[in-house]
Amino acid sequence: MANPLQSRFAAADIAQAEHYLAHEPPTDIDPRIERLVNELIGRIADKWTLLVLEELEEKGTLRFTQIGRAVEGISQKMLTQTLRRMERDGLLTRTVHPVVPPRVDYTLTPLGNSLSAAFCGVWVWAGRNLETVEAARASFDARD
């Protein structure tokens, strides 16, 4: 049976994620890196950023309205805020075309693409642990 992650991530990304999962994290982490990770986790791990990241990764350059339609439930205000934060962090580029009406396109940067690849580890972990998590949830729910 084919690996469902193969269609979503490159083999090198999957191999790198499996390597990270198999090793202990370093104990001598630069405090600046730790601060950046903590900042970005709060910003990136929110529902909207991950969904926008996924849409741009899968479909490439998209207009504001296309992203809004693809990310179900996101308001125009929240989409604007999410895209601005992602642009500020260097995850995407915003291109304004001088036409009437104005057209604005969003594209992931190499940094944004690499972040998407980094989330491959979460998919690998989820694939390995799906049944264990489901069993734990069922056991917990049965106690009530």
Image: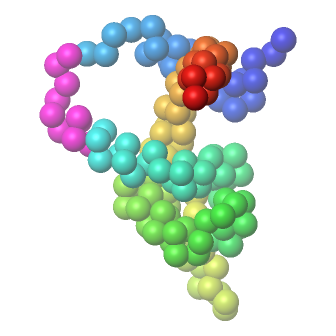
- Residue placed most toward the observer, 137 or 5: 137
Q: Position of residue 18 (x, y in %)?
A: 52, 14
- Taking the image as shown, residue 124 lies to the left or right of residue 29, namely right
Q: From where the camera sits, is residue 21 visible?
A: yes
- Residue placed most toward the observer, 141 or 8: 141
Q: Name the residue rendered at 52%, 24% in the picture.
A: 121
The relative height of residue 47 versus residue 94 in the rendered view (above or below) is: above
- Taking the image as shown, residue 118 lies to the left or right of residue 3, namely left
Quarter of the image with the N terminus is: top right
Q: Position of residue 91 (x, y in %)?
A: 46, 52
Q: Name the residue rendered at 62%, 85% in the picture.
A: 102
Quarter of the image with the C terminus is: top right
The relative height of residue 138 versus residue 82 in the rendered view (above or below) is: above
Q: From where the camera sits, is residue 87 visible?
A: no
Residue 130 among those drawn in magenta: no
The magenta region covers 27-36
Q: Position of residue 16 (x, y in %)?
A: 50, 18
Res. 90 image quadrant: bottom left
